Image (cartoon, rainbow, N blue to C red):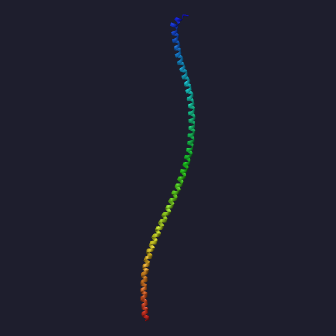
């Protein structure tokens, strides 16, 4: 073998070819690691998706539980509201009856007060007339006694 011819002609070609192979191998190695990275990311994404699905299912279950509790609370509140409305109506009816009864009692009391006032006025007039009649009678009795005393004397 002729080493000089090999080193001058063939070696540069072989080195160029080896450098090209090295670059291609590095590119392929990068592509392989990219595939591995992509597969790892795919596994992570799948795990994240499963976690998200289980979290979403738990949230849906919690929301359904809250919705059921809210529905029960709403029904309870509605029944309390109906009971309160009934009590309020009953109170208003009883209050109206009491007010009407009180108004009638007030009218009756006012009528009685007016009647008593009229009677007191009549009694006052009658007392004045009685006092006047008593004075007149006493004066007549004194005059009669005077006449009887004059006749018996």
Compared to residue 112, the image places residue 15 above or below, namely above
In x, y percent, where is residue 11? 52, 9
In x, y percent, where is residue 72? 57, 45
Q: Quadrant of the N terminus?
A: top right
Q: Quadrant of the C terminus?
A: bottom left
In x, y percent, where is residue 19? 52, 14
Q: Is residue 34 left or right of residue 119?
A: right
Q: Is residue 32 left or right of residue 134?
A: right
Quadrant hosting residue 53? top right
Comparing 5 with 14, the one in front is: 5
Compared to residue 56, the image places residue 113 above or below, namely below
Residue displayed at 56% across by 48% down: 76
Quadrant hosting residue 146? bottom left
Comparing 29 with 39, the one in front is: 29
Comparing 54 with 10, the one in front is: 10
Residue displayed at 43% across by 85% down: 138
Compared to residue 90, the image places residue 21 above or below, namely above
């Amino acid at each position: 073998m002729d080493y000089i011819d090999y080193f001058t002609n063939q070696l540069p070609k072989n080195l160029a070819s080896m450098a090209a192979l090295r670059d291609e191998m590095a590119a392929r190695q990068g592509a392989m690691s990219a595939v591995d990275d992509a597969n790892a990311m795919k596994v992570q994404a799948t795990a994240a998706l499963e976690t998200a699905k289980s979290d979403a299912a738990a949230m849906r279950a919690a929301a359904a539980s809250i919705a059921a509790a809210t529905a029960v609370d709403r029904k309870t509140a509605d029944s309390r509201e109906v009971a309160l409305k009934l009590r309020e109506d009953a109170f208003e009816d009883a209050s109206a009856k009491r007010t009407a009864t009180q108004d009638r009692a007030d009218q009756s009391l006012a009528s009685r007060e007016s009647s008593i006032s009229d009677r007191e006025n009549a009694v006052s007039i009658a007392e004045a007339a009685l006092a006047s009649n008593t004075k007149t009678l006493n004066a007549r009795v004194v005059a009669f006694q005077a006449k009887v005393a004059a006749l018996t004397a």
